[in-house]
Image (spheres, rainbow, N blue to C red):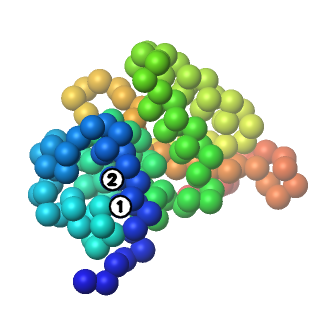
Amino acid sequence: MASLNVGNLGEYLREQRRTAQLSLRQLADAAGVSNPYLSQIERGLRKPSAEVLQQVAKALRISAETLYVRAGILDAERDRDEVETRAVILADPTLTEQQKQALLQIYESFRKENGFEVVAVRPAESDGASDARDSDAVIRDTRTTDGSDADPQQTAS
């Protein structure tokens, strides 16, 4: 089977799984996917859907956005800084969930103030509790080419 352009995603998933000290089988069970399918994703042989990536991200307790970028679902160049910053905040084991949420809210307010708006892609299924690692968002640059702010109503797609 030829390797698709998802090797980077597979390597990243394997690294995150090992960091979380989970076996392939444990992660597959937690994410609700088969062990062979997850193995194929890690080896770059299969390209998972956004839904599968969301399930895996939830099981690993990492940002689904990070996986979407690595899988090519979100624009990597445009969203990389925001996604990486969110991922670092969410992955920090020294912060409580409340502290992570506070940091993310401050970060997003500064980005919005500087001309980037957070646009929800779709709400994540959750158990009712709001959780930033489960939210999926795309960041849209609302600045014009000269650096001034554009009208967000005109930039909405």
The residue positioned 39% from the left and 68% from the top of the image is 6
The residue labelled by disc 1 is: 10
Type of amino acid under label 1: Gly
Question: Circle 2 sits in a helix, a strand or a loop, which is it?
Answer: helix
Residue 22: x and y, percent?
Answer: 23, 41
* In-front residue for pair 120/155: 120
Type of amino acid under label 2: Arg
Count how many numbered circles sit on residues in the image. 2
The residue labelled by disc 2 is: 14
Residue 5: x and y, percent?
Answer: 42, 74
* In-front residue for pair 23/82: 23
Kindly indicate the quadrant of the structure image that contains residue 131: top left
Residues at marks 1 and 2 touching, judged by CB atoms closer than 8 Å? yes
Side of 104 relative to 41 (left or right): right
**Residue 103 in view of the camera:** yes
**Position of the N terminus by quadrant:** bottom left
58 relative to 107, above or below:
below
The residue positioned 35% from the left and 26% from the top of the image is 130
124 relative to 40, above or below:
above
Kindly indicate the quadrant of the structure image that contains residue 108: top right
